[in-house]
Amino acid sequence: MKLSISSAAKAPIYQQIKEQIQAAILSGELQPGEALPSLRTLAKELRISVLTVTRAYTELEQEGFVANVQGKGCFVQGRENALLREQLLRRAESLLGEGAALARQAGLSSAEIHAMLTTLLQEEGV
Amino acid sequence: MNALELNRVCKQYDTFALDQVSFTLPRGYIMGFIGENGAGKTTTIKAILGLVHYEGDISVLGCPQEEITAVKEQVGVVLEEATFPELLNARDINSILSGVYKTWDAGRFTSLLQRFALEEKKRIKDYSRGMKMKLALAVALAHDSQLLILDEPTSGLDPVVREEVLDMLLEFIQNPNHSILISSHILSDLERICDYITFIHQGRILLSLPKEELNQTYGIYQGNEEALQRLPKGAILGLRRGQFGCQALVLREAAGNLSLEPAELEETMVLMIKGGK
Amino acid sequence: MWGLLRKDLKSLAAQGRVTAIVAIFYVILFFLSEGEDSAASMLTAMVVLLTILLPVTAVSYDERANWDRYALTMPISQNMLVWSKYLLSAGVALAGCLFLLLLLLLRGQGAEAALLLGGTLGISLFFSALLYPLFFKLGVEKGRYAMLAICLLPSVLLLVLSRMDIHLSLPDGFWVENLLLLLPGAGLLLFFLSGLLSCRIYKKKEF
């Protein structure tokens, strides 16, 4: 997994880490059961504070992306995990909602939006 | 157990005083001790090390002040302008300190010297400021230190060496029992590696908290001043008036529905100093 | 403690050339001089001088580097800093006396050695005992003037007395001998008390 953080970016560092790890989990780059780097290792590699990494990991845990095993570290959760699934659903919902709103702005009817989604799904081969 | 605990530490000088300085550094973390020159950083550090007399309580690695000499076996210190007598060289220092620290590791000291590119036979009087700092850091890391106390270690260093020093500190903190107090008058590259920030101004602690909580505690308001007048007393910690409106540091929990920008550390400190409430 | 002594010895060794030159100068004088008494007293003067000067030099090196402040961040107590300097002085005085003994034996003046050595040791310790508290209290810079004053005062006093036509009658031989025998003991006692005083002065100091 590659992580890079930017001091110039507007998002706080913990959030940059969190989002990149989320993306890696969602894309399957990080597999369920895989361990995240230890807090202190990651802090050292990225040259940031331990508590910043702690915050990113804690929020990932709260959102169901990883599970913290006391004394062993953080492990990526399986995607069947309810919390994670809920997270994914919420994200899909919000992105679809955004797309729908844009489509409305462009003057598409409900039927046209449905048709568009169907085409997209076919392209994805789902 | 905490690495450092200061409780209402006071120290009176003719023109300057430490006023009820309190803060806590938990084990395993790095604290940035920030303040302008003359704000009281060095005096506080001297009090921690028992170099000056003071009122109040300080405990270092869980030991009260009376046992401070013994606990210094586990403390590594870098002070500005305090070093070895000038005719000595690093080799002499290696043999001298093996008679001072029970846990002195001569081999480790030698390899640290190499890493910092310090010649063993060069006398201290031919050292630059940066070299003296690196020597002191090598000394601090060549015995069984649990706590590093570094007074302005990166000032006067060129960027490459500063990076090296930061890497050493991050390596040190890999052990979760290790802690670092690092003072500086500038934030810059230090800010990123600090877990805790303690800000001292004119002998008083204005702020001491985990860096990640800064933004949860404070916010910055930008706009016209009237909106601020509705806030309860004590909600505004600093105010700067400009031609096109004002900027204020506000306690989030007292801010009601006022819309606030994230509080960046530097902005927070500037507002706290220039604050004129 | 040994670490501290090692530091001072290394510091002094690093500028040992000066010491060696002084010593050689006195040794040559010693062998060139005719009278036995004046030769021996010359060496006594040398030993006393070195006993005072070497530790003072060590203190001034420490001061210039702010060593005390740094040392106190290590597992070294204030008392250790004080006593290590006293030990250093005692060591230099003893080494000086041994050197003196060697020279006396070489010149076949062994008979008077005991008395001379005792006197030299006593006087060396006496001066160290006077000077250390001053140095610890005032620092080396101001302490230097105090040192000069202490060294010059007896001479000035004698001069003034002689000008005023008051002549001190020297005690007879018996007294001198007994006094010389007493000197090392008295010097040592004073030396020890001075150490305690210095520790108290140090406790009040800030670094």
Image (tube, grey):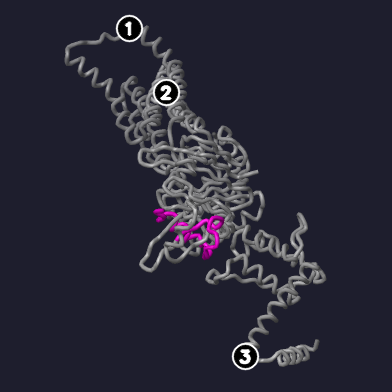
Please say if C184 is above or below B89.
above
On the image, the x and y values in percent for residue A90 come to 72, 73
The quadrant of the rendering that contains the N terminus of chain B is top right
Tell me the number on the disc at residue C88.
Answer: none
On the image, the x and y values in percent for residue B277 come to 41, 53
Label 3 residue SS = loop
Query: Which range is magenta?
Result: B248-277
Q: Which residue is mark 2?
A: C125
Q: Marks 2/3: CA distance?
A: 101 Å
Tell me the number on the disc at residue A106.
Answer: 3
Instruction: Residue lying at the far front in this picture: please name it.
Output: B230
Q: Residue at x 66, y 63 (%)?
A: A56
Given the image, what chain letter belongs to the residue carrying mark 2?
C
Tell me the number on the disc at residue C172.
Answer: 1
Q: Nearer the viewer, mark 1 or mark 3?
A: 3
Q: In the rendered structure, which amino acid carries the disc numbered 2?
A: Leu
Label 2 residue SS = helix
Looking at the image, which is closer to me, B147 or B219? B219
Given the image, what chain letter belongs to the residue carrying mark 3?
A
Q: Is residue B138 magenta?
A: no
Q: Nearer the viewer, mark 2 or mark 3?
A: 3
Answer few, some or many: residues within 10 Å of disc 2's Cα (few below 14, many 20 plus, some between 14 and 19).
many
Q: In the rendered structure, which amino acid carries the disc numbered 3?
A: Ala
Q: Marks 2/1: CA distance?
A: 25 Å
